Amino acid sequence: MKTKSRSNAARATRRTFTAGLGAAGFIASAAPFSILRAQGGPLKVGVLLPRSGLQAGIGQDCQRGVAIAPAILKSLGLPDLAIVNGDTESNVDTARARAEQLINDGVQLLVGAFDSGQTTAIAQVAEQKGIPLVINIAGAPQITEQGYKFVFRNFPTGPMIVGDAFDNQKEIFAAAGATPKTVVFMHINDTYGTSIAGAVDHVLPKFDMPYTIAEKISYDPAARDLSVEVAKAKATNADALLVVSRLNDAMLLTRELVKQRWTPQAILSMGPGWYEDQYIKTLGKLSDGPISFVPWYDPHKKLTGVLEAALAKADPGVNLNTNHIFTFEALLVAADAYKRAGSTDPKALAEAIRTANITDNVSIGPGISFNAKGQNDKVKDGAIQNIGGKLVTLAPKEAANAKPEWPLPSYQSRG
Amino acid sequence: MPFDLYLNVAIGGVLTGLVYGLMALGLSVIFGVVRVVNFAHGEMMTIAMFLAVVLCTGLHLDPLILLVPIAAVMFAFGYVLQRGLINLFVTRPEHTQFLLLVALAIVITNTLLIIFGPDARSVQTAYGFESFQFGPVLVDAAKVYAGLAAIAFAAGLFVFFRFTLVGKAIRACADNHTGALVVGLDVKRLYALTFGLGAACVGAAGTMLTLIIDTTPTLGPSYTLLAFVIVITGGLGSMPGALLGGVLIGLTEALAGLMFTPSVKSMFAFAILVLVLLFRPQGILGKRLA
């Protein structure tokens, strides 16, 4: 038994020698590629969005920008991103907790989070942990005024949105040959709404606008009945309605405008809600007419066409909008930085983002670059109008593809 | 501001308040008889609202037509809930009842979230965008129908409690529990009937609220709180008090929103509650405890 055993063992050794040699050769030959994979593997990016709760609709819309990104980034020759999704549940505390959780799980860069309050909380965590945060959407100016080294925003601040909105309004008034003399200003009282309202107070005197604000009416974005607010606005007899809202309250406001039989000359929105697909689909003909002053895409840019085509393929019937554009661009910034940094080291990534100069992009303006505070101060707002269930760009001139429809057709005559 | 604006807003507030009142009436009836505070009241209302949304959307029916069927479904739900679960806790300490009903509320909210998701849903009706014009006064048609239906439903409930034998037996239970047992009333069954009637009120109110507001699974807690504010203001256990409280809170919120800033209108409803607790703790139409 012993001899046989030895003999078997010896045979086994001989047989396995060749196989072992082959395996060793394979491992040795594969080793350099393994090392290369470690260096060039996908960047782990945590995308924090309000996927449930009050802002779920918008969060899920932002996700469309995430879904179409990988193929486009690949076509641009940029490295792969490993996306890890996180849900802020439309809640500041949850946003903070999820950011910490994602970082503990090993994400190397954060993107998010649509809402200024939630983004502020995430920015604090990102800075504390030294992980770069690329903000997709959030307008509160203070986020990039804290001296943070790891926080970058490719989205206009409240004052930038308001300033561009006033510039674009002047262009539209000139094109329409009509100017409202008074407006009533309705705004939500959350972080975003109050920051825009504050910016309006601050910026309006500098722009020499042709109208005065007859009354300011703030309201809760979670309000379920806006009849009193609209009655109060209607009573001012203002020519136009200037508004900062979200999606649900934009629909509530429209319903109340119809019920209270008030069609102002124009609805001038400086926030989300009025141009979104759910608004257009839910209200049908009643959704036509509002003009939104929002960070938007330049329809003449090459990458815009690519993004539109990708979205049309992934989600037929969905109009490209702010949520898709800026969420996609945040991932574009991440991939571009990773390519140039050649490393997942957070400091190297942050430095690469700081020196970004992306001219092949989608949003209006010369491109994506960041100032010392981490803010893209060159990104521009557009003015868009809902016409026939579609969104057309009215201003600025370089991005315009339609003339304004003015005044707003009466709600009662729409059938 | 012109007078007709006040009138417009006040009418809207009263009509909405009537629906709130009907919702709170259910809470008041349950507490008045069973002596259990229903902390899942708002959540039960969201069940009715989702039933209304699903049936209106699926069968293309008007919520007003569904009012009685949904109230009947909610009655059955309340009856079974009381007999099967809450009855076991009737004699237990109040904090145990509180925990049970809060747990039930959380289960309802999360079940609705799992089934329907977080998005707001609305019902489409032919009169959804209509309003009635009386001179300078514009009244939202949906609110008029909802308010009138609330009055009709509450009137039916008053008639039931005052003129039917079962209603009188339930009142007897509420007035003297021991006496009701002595004369041979089936108190457990009457408790279940009462809980069912409370749930039917909330079912009717929820169905009508779909005409006024959008439906989301997370509506429950704020409406439970609102129901408490209303019944404490009107008088815990008082049926007319609940309706009066509803109208008062609806009117106060509407006028406060108009005269001050709309974003603080809820503050005025709570201010009324504080005043009532300070100067008439038993509520406006409540009975003073011995």
Image: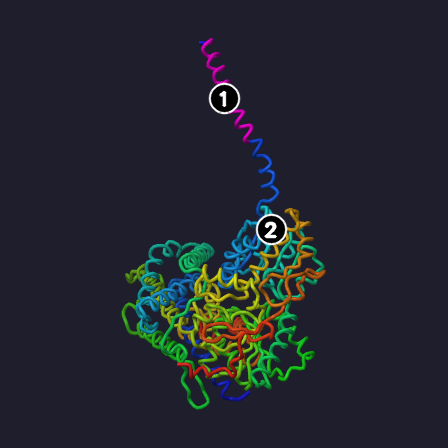
* Residue name at image x 58 percent, y 34 percent: A31
Q: Amino acid at mark 2?
A: Glu
Q: Is residue B148 left or right of residue A85?
A: left
Res. B65 image quadrant: bottom left
Q: Is residue B70 left or right of residue B241?
A: left
Which range is magenta?
A: A2-26
Res. B215 image quadrant: bottom left
Choose between B168 and A229: the one closer to the eye.
A229
Residue wearing tag 2: A100
N-terminal label among 1 and 2: 1
| Magenta portion: prevailing SS class | helix
Q: Which image quarter is the N terminus of chain A in? A: top left
Q: Chain of mark 2?
A: A
Q: Which image quarter is the C terminus of chain A in? A: bottom left
Choose between B209 and A374: the one closer to the eye.
A374
Q: Amino acid at mark 1?
A: Thr
Camera-nearest label, 1 or 2: 1
Q: Tag 2's secondary structure?
A: helix
Residue wearing tag 1: A16
Residue A10: say if magenta. Answer: yes
Residue B230 visible (yes or no): yes
Residue A291: say if magenta. Answer: no
Mark 1 → mark 2, Cα distance in angstroms? 50 Å
User: Height in image: B238 above or below A92?
Assistant: below
* Residue name at image x 42 percent, y 74 percent: A284
